[in-house]
Image: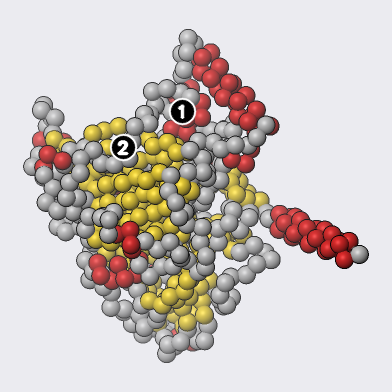
Amino acid sequence: MARSTGIVSDMFLSFLLIFSSLASFTNAKTHHHGFIVQETKVTRLCKTHKSITVNGQFPGPTLEVNNGDSLVIKVVNKAKYNVTIHWHGVRQVRTAWADGPEFITQCPIRPGQSYTYRFTISGQEGTLWWHAHSSWLRATVYGAIVIHPKQEDSYPFPKPNRESVIMLGEWWDANPIDVIREARRTGGAPNVSDAYTINGQPGDLYNCSSKDTVIVPVSSGETNLIRVINAALNQQLFFKIANHKFTVVGADASYVKPFTTPVLMLGPGQTTDVLIKGDQTPGRYYMAARAYASAQGAPFDNTTTTAILEYKTAKGVSSKPIMPALPRFNDTNTATAFTTSFRSPGKTLVPKTIDENLFITAGLGINKCPPKAKASTCQAPNRTRFTASMNNVSFVLPSNFSLLQAHHHGIPGVFTTDFPVNPPVSFDYTGNVSRSLWQPTRGTKVYKLKYGAKVQVVLQGTSIFTAENHPIHLHGYDFYVVAEGFGNFNPKTDTSKFNLVDPPLRNTVSLPVNGWAVIRFVADNPGTWIMHCHLDVHIGWGLAMVFVVDNGVGLLETLEPPPKDLPVSRTSMAVSDESAPLFRERVADKAVRSSAAARHP
């Protein structure tokens, strides 16, 4: 009898688990959106520009979903430039075709064409964002992604009274595409921005901007959730609210162990969720952001953007808001104190053993001017051209096929699989580096990973030309930041600093100026995933590499087939009559093998 009761009890528990899973699945929604990429007149700093926007909005629309929901977003390109959209931080499990980086997972959406991105938010809660991933279009083509808990779940902190999104950005009093094209022509650094923005507005400290300064409401006694996103193109930013402290509760769509801080520092690509209390004398308080500029001697935009935190009882009052005291531009101590405060709230799945151990240098470089080149095309110091690299390889984007197409269909000649696991030469990475090491090689080199491999990457900054903080972003994955430090990484002593208990989960890590950071992840998402510096000037110079993760076993470990409307390049459209049958044969054979693997795991 007792045994029968136990069986019934077990069956009842199993039924409850199945019912719970089905209920969760049933509550998930599919959100449909239309993105029209178009030219829009935008007036800032007293001038009107024809800026590229989504749906005529700057910033673009905020996408609000719950964990578990799916998104179907049709992007129609009515602009004059090629474009792709990247859903920054979304895991894209088995849906790498929807990740968005140009010529990595797709060819660009050409003017007059469209592409529908389809993906599911799975196991992520908090704040992410979307942005263009073609040239410098993301200067104005970006927006927030707000991910609420599943409908039956709640935040791991008291429900806030209200929520606000704060998107930090950069504004050029020029066409950003012209700015980067001129830099590519000259080989020098591009002009710095003319303003920073909060939700698209520069704020009170700039000309012709006060009437549009963003107002963020608060009532006395409230606890509000503010989702801060650094959407700036090329600048890490400090962010502060006068007389108020932040309780940090999340970052990059993962919860963190709460901690209190008076100031935030975000690199481009990073998000931070904070709680603030309306516990000050009712009034108006500036929210302000300005540069954390770690590169000694490098020019940067030294202006300050503001919005206003306004207490409800102070609405309509004309008193000047209180300004916070922001850190010095080069305050690395404050930046480090912030980035090293993050911890996961509970037990983590950080890999304890490692299958793949990479040591990757990241930094700038210099290319010698070609012998017959005009001086006007070599305007970096000493008649050179700026470049950047990882492990001395300056990454070159393909131009005929995306890496994912080439990998999936077995198309030869698009990339090589010889990205080095270590730099080709060991040197004093953060010291006085010999000029003979300043010029990297160029190539489209990838590093292959087996499905399920446990990966450690030691990211080592260099002082070539100048050292600086690099926000390193990995597509397709969250990773654990197990340690960071200054100087050259020492495997004999620095491993003792590894946090393998509660390291934070991020998608973008701040690689310290003249320092190192160590990340770990499990390669459980098949596809081609770029890891790059999120300073757009640096990715354009080649500070990137790509992991190619193979399929595992069975359907759930296999990349989905490419969508029928996946954009293709003009070259791949114009495959010659002679080679077209061979290409189609490869594609068909690959599809048959993928289908067979899915049916017979």
| Above or below 303: residue 22 | above
Give the quadrant of the C terminus: top right
Of 597 and 587, which appears nearest the observer?
Answer: 597
Name the residue located 39 percent from the left edge and 26 percent from the top edge: 414
Q: Quadrant of residue 149?
A: bottom right
Q: Quadrant of residue 585?
A: top right
**Residue 589: x and y, percent?**
58, 21
| Above or below 587: residue 280 | below
Dot 1 surroundings within 10 Å: few (below 14), some, or many (20 or more)?
some
The residue under label 2 is which amino acid type?
Pro
Question: Which numbered tag is attached to residue 305?
Answer: none
- Residue at the limit of the structure toward the right, as seen here: 1
Of 226 and 543, which appears nearest the observer?
Answer: 543
Question: Which numbered tag is attached to residue 420?
Answer: 2
What kind of element bears circle 1?
helix
Dot 2 surroundings within 10 Å: few (below 14), some, or many (20 or more)?
some
The residue under label 1 is which amino acid type?
Ala
Query: What kind of colouring is applied to the model shown?
Result: secondary structure
Pointer 1 residue: 406
| Mark 2 or 1, closer to the camera | 2
Of 292 and 94, which appears nearest the observer?
Answer: 94
Give the side of residue 458 with respect to residue 584, left or right.
left
Name the residue located 47 percent from the left edge and 13 percent from the top edge: 579
If you read the primary sequence from the N terminus, does the residue marked by circle 2 or circle 1 appear first? 1
Name the residue located 67 percent from the left edge and 31 percent from the top edge: 600
What kind of element bears circle 2?
loop
Give the side of residue 16 with respect to residue 590, left or right.
right
**Residue 203: x and y, percent?**
35, 68
